Amino acid sequence: MTGCTAQPSVLSATKNVVLVGNPNVGKSVLFKNLTSHYVVVANYPGTTVEIIRANSKVDGAEFTVCDTPGLNDLRQISEDAKVTTRVLTEDLDTVIVQVADAKNLRRALLLTMQLAELKRPMVLVLNMFDELEERGGKIDVSKLSEILRIPVVPTVAPIGRGTEDLLHALKHAAIPKGDWIPEHDSAHASLNQDKMDRVNGILAETYTLDQPEKAPFRVKLGFWAMHRFLGLGFAAAALVTVFWFVGLFGAGTMVDFLEVGVFQHHVNPVAIKVVDAALPFSHSHATEQLGVTIGFPITPVNEVEIANFSRTVTVPEYLVTDNADPGALSSFNRFVHDFLVGEFGAITMALSYAFAIVLPIVTTFFLVFSILEDSGYFPRMSIMVNRVFKWMGLNGKAVLPMILGLGCDTMATMTTRILDTRRERLITTVLLALAVPCSAQLGVLLALMATLSAQAAAIWLTVVVAVILVVGWLTNQLFKSEPSDFILEIPPMRRPQLDNVVIKTVSRLNWYLKEVIPLFVLGTAILFVLDRLKLLAVIVRAGEPLVTGWLGLPAETTNAFLIGFLRRDFGAVYLLDAATGADPILNAHQVLVAMITITLFIPCIANLLVIAKENGRKVALQMAVFIFPFAFLVGGIINHVGLWLSST
């Protein structure tokens, strides 16, 4: 973790600005408004687990803005609180901007008292002021500023209201003064009655509440989403929406259009033609009539046809011309040609998979994920599953990293720092690595699920959930201790902001393009090299007893698990192609077995490295040694049980 000490070349006489506040008060959105630099914004605590810095200007003067993790008390011992406290105590040349939820002024002022003891220039931001007014609350901002002796600025961060006022207030930041600041040691002041009495006194002078007769609809909606029975309906609706938008529209309509209509009809033939011209050797490519139907999905088996077209295209397969020149130049040209546009070509396979299959899937997933995230629904899901998570020695807060794992397991592993004990972090990390598919893999799994019956899809979901529960319970038995208290800030349900949703989606797609696509190219290159060295066939034969005998899958699918060591989602894409390509080789039973095995398969290299960084190399190795055979064990059991049931 780094502090916010600026380099002399960045700042002159101006100070740094550190954003501090309780979890879930909108610091990250305010940071974006101040700096035009995006940080992933979430309506739950724990998103900002590392210090984020960017530059901003006031009247031409440049300064550094730091966004710190949320905390409720400077004396907390969590990793996030330690980071924030370190920034505040080590960087002396700072202006503290405390961001507060205007609806929860009492909690904010308790933190203000601790910050005041640091004797640094401060500005208090009352964010979510529109939600306070909607609930009938009023704060006398001028009076509050007069009592605290610091600027107080009301804001509505998602729409940028109050940002200019805050920039102006930074020039007038002041060290808090007054008899409201406790004079005794802060180690005893944070929880004592004297401090609470002082806060209540300030509230009596500045805060009034004229509660409306009827609660706003979104407040009711928030309670319904946490209701014991109605909440199940919300969860079911969310799952159905994700399945339709990602599994049917993204993995169906969009993939059909991009994979066949764009890549196979246009990109691949053009690439083959260009490479043939640049790297000539005596050969001729095959052609085939390739058709595609683009439809709008209604159900997994019904769609409204939008377009239907076909054309004759050039394919990667080719025949070497008789009496071809066997010279070194021709051999070199053929080698590079095959690397680019061959069966395991960087263009015809890696880029085709990455852009035509995975990109539309992760785009639709990131979009719907961002909408649910921005609405404030995910913390309510934590409430719903808290009772189940207790059985595994966790609490509902652990669902937050696991939900983030649906975006990226690597990022989610880092956010396990928000959990209070090492035991909870270890259990959650095991579950993330074992049974929580990342966005790319989940999207491909949803596409595979769309090829199955509802019963088979339910079996996959049941097996994955059962694995999470059983492994979580067993891991809890190894690290037996009392779970920590479940304290979680629940934000109001909000209408998702279009700009937030778009920026989140684009930011995550940027991560995908930078991090995942190079690994796809690397994975294809590994397959290409193994194929050229005649080792791929050897590996396939060696894996046949396990893949064909135990799992009951075709020998060709060994490649999926081989490349799955690099990235699980790449392995899943290989299986999707085997199940839905021009010549599918998997039946429904085999698709189910393959889905379960690749879901539980070893996590990607990046995730293993982060596990090692967070928990030690020994723990990462132990997890890998457990997960690999466990995935094949469960997949094989499902295969043999299914075969037994079908024969009886």
Image: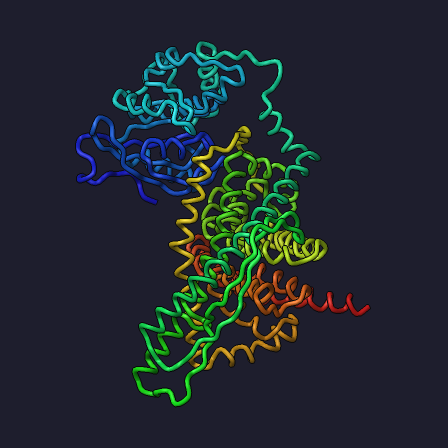
Look at 32% across and 75% down and name the residue there.
279
Residue 625 higher or lower than 129, as above or below: below
Most extreme residue toward the right is 648
Say whether residue 422 is visible: no
| Camera-side residue of 587 and 597 | 587
Say whether residue 402 is visible: yes
| Camera-side residue of 379 and 57 | 57
Left or right, 337 with reference to 495: left
Residue 299 percent across, percent down from the top left: 66, 49
| Camera-side residue of 259 and 32 | 259
Most extreme residue toward the bottom is 323
| Camera-side residue of 606 and 544 | 544
Pick the quarter of the image with the C terminus.
bottom right
The mark tally for this picture is: 0
Pick the quarter of the image with the N terminus.
top left
Left or right, 388 with reference to 43: right
Look at 38% across and 10% down and name the residue there.
143
* Quadrant housing residue 15: top left
Residue 192 percent across, percent down from the top left: 48, 22
